[in-house]
Amino acid sequence: MTHPSIPVVDAAAVPVLTAAQMRRVDELMVEEVGINLLQMMENAGRALAELALARFAPSSATVLAGAGGNGGGGLAAARHLVNRGVAVRVALASPPAPGTAAHGQLRAALACGATLVDPPTSSDLVIDALVGYGLTGALRGRTAELARWALDEEAPVLALDAPSGLDTTTGTADPSAIRATATLTLALPKAGLVESPVAGELYLADISVPRSVYAELGLQVPELFDRAPLVRLRQGADPVIGPADGTPLAWRTPLEAVRLILIGATFATGARIALVVGTLLTVVNLGGTFTSGEAGPATALQAAANYLIPYVVSSLGVLSRTRIRVDDRPS
């Protein structure tokens, strides 16, 4: 599958929010802007589904959903994924209360073809929508059980807003916190997500928060979504940024890995290593041949190989960290 281009933004240039600040953003959205919880939930779910398809291309997904707003966003994503041909199973930490936005999202997801499962079953992708920025204290009860289940799975995990068990203000992670392959955070990144070892790749989605809301919090926010409603936040030790357009390097089969090498998706990393190593090899092995004027077609071919081989080897190193491991146990 061809992955759409996801623009890349330097995380250091983006303000971060504490949990209390994000709670205030939500309040201002409802009280002053007129965007209600259901609309924000829908925006979050649609963005989560788009990232799941672009980054992981699953044929099946298991959504772990809490009873609150984070769970509602995961359930909205479940509906969008079902409508895009993905087999979706939903495992609930607890049923959403009737009449709530999350309950409406559950009804819609089930009506569209998602299925409830208990216990959860293995899929190509696990979506963590148990607890968002509102976490207080340790994970407990059924939520902790589902988090531990996710930790034991081999499938990649995509977390909504924050991996469940991570304090989004302090960055402290519960011992049973979910370790995400990627996290889609909303509006602005939360302070505890930055460089967190459990957050994985960090993405940011637009949920229609205007700059006037951030201004009330004393924040100046750069234009983040002028190219797309979803961006990748590049962090200090980010190992998975691909070409200049930010296309993720996810792959499943050796054929897909070969394709990424051939189209130059790993060129940025591979080219640097090939330039240094290839130059050294050429100087050591062929320097005399070139300076003596005895170079011919075979010499030129060997010089090209001095650059090509390091490029391929370094590309394989990059791709070894971006493979999607699909759990193939029967569900």
Image (tube, rainbow, N blue to C red):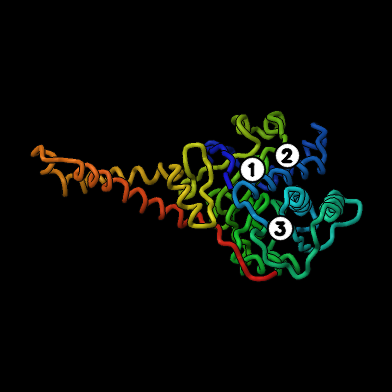
Q: Residue furthest front?
A: 297
Q: Position of residue 112 (x, y in %)?
A: 83, 52
Badge 3 marks a residue whose secondary structure is: loop
The quadrant in which residue 296 appears is top left
Identify residue for label 1: 17
Q: Which badge, 1 or 3, is on the more N-terminal residue?
A: 1
Q: Which badge, 2 or 1, is on the more N-terminal residue?
A: 1
Q: Is residue 277 visible?
A: no
**Type of amino acid at the residue the image marks with label 1:** Leu
From the viewer's perspective, is residue 17 above or below residue 61? Answer: above
Q: Which residue lies furthest to the right in this view?
A: 99
At 78% from the left and 62% from the top, the residue drawn is 92
| Quadrant housing the C terminus | bottom right
Identify residue for label 2: 25
Q: Which badge, 3 or 2, is on the more N-terminal residue?
A: 2
Identify residue for label 3: 136
Disc 2 vs disc 1: Cβ atoms closer than 8 Å? yes
Task: Report, in whole angstroms, how far the alpha carbon at label 1 lies from the one at label 3.
Answer: 16 Å
Badge 2 marks a residue whose secondary structure is: helix
**Type of amino acid at the residue the image marks with label 2:** Val
The quadrant in which residue 142 appears is bottom right
**Type of amino acid at the residue the image marks with label 3:** Thr
Apparent side of residue 222 relative to residue 85 in the rendered image (left or right): left
Q: Is residue 305 visible?
A: yes
Q: Position of residue 186 (x, y in %)?
A: 67, 43
